[in-house]
Amino acid sequence: MNKIAKTVPKAQSGADMVQQKPTVPQHLKAIYRDMVAEKASIESIIPAGMDIKRVLRVAFSQVARTPSLHRCDSRTIVDSVVMAASLGLEIGVNGLCYLVPYKGRCQFQLGYKGMIELARRSGEITTLIARAVYENDEFEYNYGLDEVLIHKPATSGRGKLTHVYAMAKLKDGGHCFDVLTREDVEKAKKSAASTNGPWSTHYDEMAKKTAIKRLFKYLPVSIEAQNVVAMDDAADRGEQVYVDTTCNDEQFVERIASAVVIEDDPEQEQEVKPLTEDSKNQGELLK
């Protein structure tokens, strides 16, 4: 019987292990330092119950995993983190909001689930949903004194998207809905500053978001929620937002109310995941 020779890997010395440990890029260190510099300002505006350490950790994790954000002005990254924190939304978690690179700048982008979250906070809305309708679904709607909305999705082979709608049920028992045709959605797409990004990769989700934005004008939502949606609308015009965390609370609210953002990159429907082995060293910065 032939013996099988076993090769025992040579133990690595401490020096070798240190050499193999990935280093944190200087630009990521600079971004993190800028975040930490605004820690007190951010902590002063986040809602009760939010942990500032988690806010920074989640935000930095998203930056570390998105190479296109590494090239963005770090000041605009911090501004976007401030915007998300002020609204009580975690970046990249459950599709609430995102950090979006655009022409060397980072922009805050509200996800359609974030819009739903803001609307529900008013306490006047019990249900707010958006759905896509496809050509083989059973779909009927009618406006007027006797409004009708019936949607029975096909169980298979639903075909192409034909409509999207948003529907809300109110605390007092009332309801409202708005339906957009494919043509309506295409008009919204064409009016956007960029038809790439989410419109090309997440068309159905952007269509739902468009429906919710249009329904907002009929909903009993807070001024905060209305202003955020107005900011999102302005994104299609390519306007930018700058957030000054040094101003007082009243000034900050005024800045938020008049601010506008850019929307460009895809909404990636994913939760924040633990850092990979390659990026653990980046996460060490947050300890």
Image: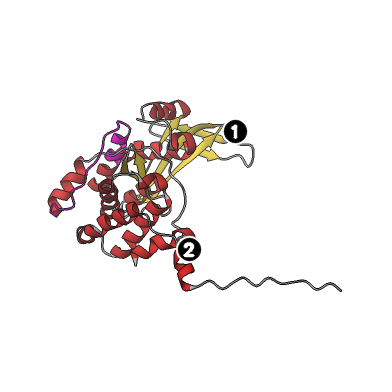
Mark 2: secondary structure: helix
Residue ID for mark 2: 20
Q: Quadrant of residue 235?
A: top left
Q: Mark 2 and 1 residues: CB-CB less than 8 Å, in contact?
A: no
Residue ID for mark 1: 159
Q: Is residue 6 above or below residue 111?
A: below
Amino acid identity at mark 1: Gly
Say whether residue 57 is visible. Answer: yes
Q: Which quadrant is home to the C terminus?
A: bottom left
Rendered residue at 32%/50% (across/down): 118
Whole-Å distance between the Cαs marked 2 and 1? 52 Å
The label number, if any, that marks residue 134 in the structure image: none
Left/right placement of residue 84 relative to residue 21 reads left
Neighbor class of circle 2 (other Cα within 10 Å; few <14, some 14-19, many 20+) is few
Q: Is residue 26 above or below residue 217?
A: below
Q: Is residue 87 above or below residue 105?
A: below
Mark with earlier residue (2, 1): 2
| Colour scheme in use | secondary structure
Q: Is residue 12 above or below residue 269?
A: below
Figure disc tally: 2
Between residues 245 and 49, which one lies in front from this camera angle? 245
Q: Main secondary structure of the magenta part?
A: loop
Residue 140: % across, % down: 51, 33
Q: Quadrant of residue 36?
A: bottom left
Between residues 230 and 222, which one lies in front from this camera angle? 230
Q: Which residues are magenta?
A: 229-248
Q: Quadrant of residue 183?
A: top left
